[in-house]
Amino acid sequence: MKPNQADVLDLLAAEFVLGTLAGAARRRFERWRDADPFVERRVRAWEDRLAGLAFQLEPVTPSPGVWVSIERQIGPVLQGRWRAVAASIAAIAVLGFGWFLWQQLRVAPPAAEAVIASKAGEALWRVELAADGEYVEVSAVGAVSYPDQRSLELWALPPEASPVSLGLMPASGRLRLVLDERQRAAVGLAANVAVSEEPLGGSPTGAPTGPVLYVAAIART
Amino acid sequence: MAGLLAACARQDRQAFQRLYEMTSSQLLACLMRILRNRALAEDALQDVYVQVWRQAIRFERGRGSSWAWLIAIARYRAIDLQRRERRLAAGSSDDIAEMAADEEPHDSLMALGHHAAAALDGCLAALQSRQRDCILLSYQNGMTHAEVADQIGEPLGSVKSWIRRGLTALRRCLES
């Protein structure tokens, strides 16, 4: 009996999850999974089925430095989180990352900023580009009304080019968005930033898909 | 735990830290078994959680258990790294002895994961021993068909068919 196509796909999904699908075939299948929700569901189902095998392994507690590095990579929590800041500082001190401390305490004026305001003119967020151009920091400064089950996404609008996503807007507090090369170039060229409403998690396409709610001019300092 | 992931998707840092505290030791175990080197595994663990933080939203889009989603991210990362390393150089120091567990964070969350594991254990036990061995070697150690064949000293063709039949039987058993 010849296996039908669905069976073949399911077996491929199983071998992808297991890891025995290797090399070019693995990369091809990965792209297929990313592009096709049907394939992704089959993969998810196998991930669920086999996850129990991971619990046969004895847990191993990570070194404290791992969490410190993770926090560093996703950006610090600055507002009203003294406890977390103190904990990171302590861990960093123990690890001897003096330079990181210095970076935390360093105060450099932003290279550029934009204030995103409501139609009534009330400031909602301040977006600041770090002096070294490595990240932007978005602070909610007004009463932000965040749509339920939706995300607000920040875009740089370089002239005569497509908008480039910089990340999701915080509903409150301050959020640091570390920029990659493409984002840095777009921010460097852009005269404006915009905020669009997107599905939860941000635009699935890489371009704005929902209504553009706000546009603000970038002031270089 | 799905609630914690949903909170991460809303950029809730405290929820993220709790998720890390509850799950990181199990993920590190998966990474160490595949990468066989603690430093490498801890580097990978960082990447995994940065990815979890950035993609927590994707979890909600699909269905499935949150444990399975986290474990999958960790295993894929480890498998990619391990195969890249192998292409670069043959042989590396074997830190697997370091895998001694120093703690048992058995809260209700762990219980949840173990509960799912219990159903799987029953079905695994029902497999032929060769099928079971091959599936465990590839899942837990991240081995390819050829590496499994090497490890157990059986022909590649047999290993391939044991794995396929084992997977099909597992699925049937878990769905019954």
Image (tube, coloured by chain):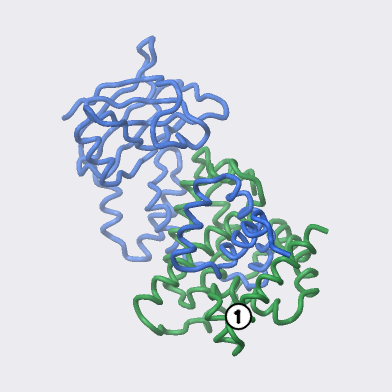
Chain colours: A blue, B green
* Quadrant in which residue B127 is drawn: bottom right
Camera-nearest residue between A117 and B80 = B80
> Residue furthest toward the right?
B176
Q: Is residue A41 visible?
A: yes
* Quadrant in which residue B159 is drawn: bottom right
Camera-nearest residue between A121 and B82 = B82
* Quadrant in which residue B89 is drawn: bottom left
Camera-nearest residue between B175 and A185 = B175
Q: How many marks?
A: 1
Q: Residue at x 78, y 64 (%)?
A: B119
Look at label 1 and name its amino acid. Gly
Q: Is residue B33 visible?
A: no
Mark 1 highlights which residue? B157
Q: Residue B34 in the image: x percent, y percent?
A: 52, 73
> Residue furthest toward the bottom?
B153
Location of residue A160 with respect to B146 vertically, above or below: above
Q: Residues within 10 Å of mark 1 (few under 14, many from 20)?
A: few
User: Regarding mark 1 in the picture, which secondary structure is present there?
Assistant: helix
- Left/right placement of residue B111 relative to residue B61 reads right
Camera-nearest residue between B41 and A45 = A45
Q: Quadrant of the C terminus of chain A?
A: top left
- Of all chains, the one bearing label 1 is B
Q: Residue at x 63, y 43 (%)?
A: B3
Q: Residue A214 in the image: x percent, y percent?
A: 37, 20
Location of residue A97 with respect to A79 vertically, above or below: below
Q: Residue B110 in the image: x percent, y percent?
A: 69, 61
Q: Residue at x 35, y 37 (%)?
A: A166
Q: Quadrant of the N terminus of chain A?
A: bottom right
